[in-house]
Image: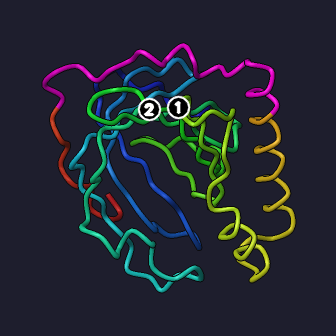
Amino acid sequence: MGSPLFDAQEVIVRREILDGREWMVYPVRVVEDTGDLLAVHLVQGTPLTFGPGPFRWGPHPWTAFEPYWQSEGVLQLRRPGDGYSVWARHSGGEFTGWYVNFQEPMRRTERGFDTLDQELDLLLLPADGSPYRWKDEDHFAERHRSGGFTDEEAAAVRAAAASVVELVERGAGWWEEWRGWRAPEGWQVPEAVPLGA
């Protein structure tokens, strides 16, 4: 595995790496780390730090907003080797569904993990009446067309997406056991993470 497991409640660093440099960095709190699963929590109000560029994809799209996580807290679940993570979404404290974020498989570091969002997302919304709904398909396709993804990278994203759809259609989502999880009272917003830290 290369890096030791993280302790529950430890604050670690999630970095998006583009062009070999930090594109976006933010702290998350460990919920559980078994080696086969890393569950972390992103607290509302968490500061986001963006790399100055230039990047081949331009500045991170979230730089257009205030530099902190504005939505309610999110549980993020990821497994080694998977080209995606699964986020539990809430509104008013109530579970509203799962958000599957396709991204590079996580690479553990001494302080957390690195990845890169790959545009495509899948919404699993129980109130929606359908098993799933795609998000940002056009952004993903355009990124591929413009050379932002190689053919191999785009194929890997599509393969990850197909594997998740297959799990959903079989009713075999491994993430479902986390549906009732809520962040404990008193978990505070972590301090901002400086670039290169």
Q: As drawn, which residue projects farthest toward the bottom?
A: 54
The part of the chain drawn in magenta is 166-187
Lateral position of residue 32 relative to residue 171, left or right: left
Circle 1/circle 2 CB separation < 8 Å: yes
Eyeballing the image, is 157 above or below 98? Answer: below
Which residue is painted at 35% across and 73% down in the image? 63
Eyeballing the image, is 65 above or below 85? Answer: below
* 161 or 7: nearer the viewer: 161
Mark 1 or 2: the one toward you: 1
Eyeballing the image, is 187 above or below 45? Answer: above
Q: Position of residue 34 (x, y in %)?
A: 52, 17
Q: Label 1 belongs to which residue?
A: 127
Q: Position of residue 78 (x, y in %)?
A: 57, 33
Lateral position of residue 67 relative to residue 25, left or right: left
Q: Position of residue 136 (x, y in %)?
A: 63, 62
Q: Label 2 belongs to which residue?
A: 96
| Quadrant that contains the C terminus | bottom left
Q: Is residue 180 magenta?
A: yes
Q: Position of residue 42 (x, y in %)?
A: 33, 40
| Quadrant that contains the N terminus | top right
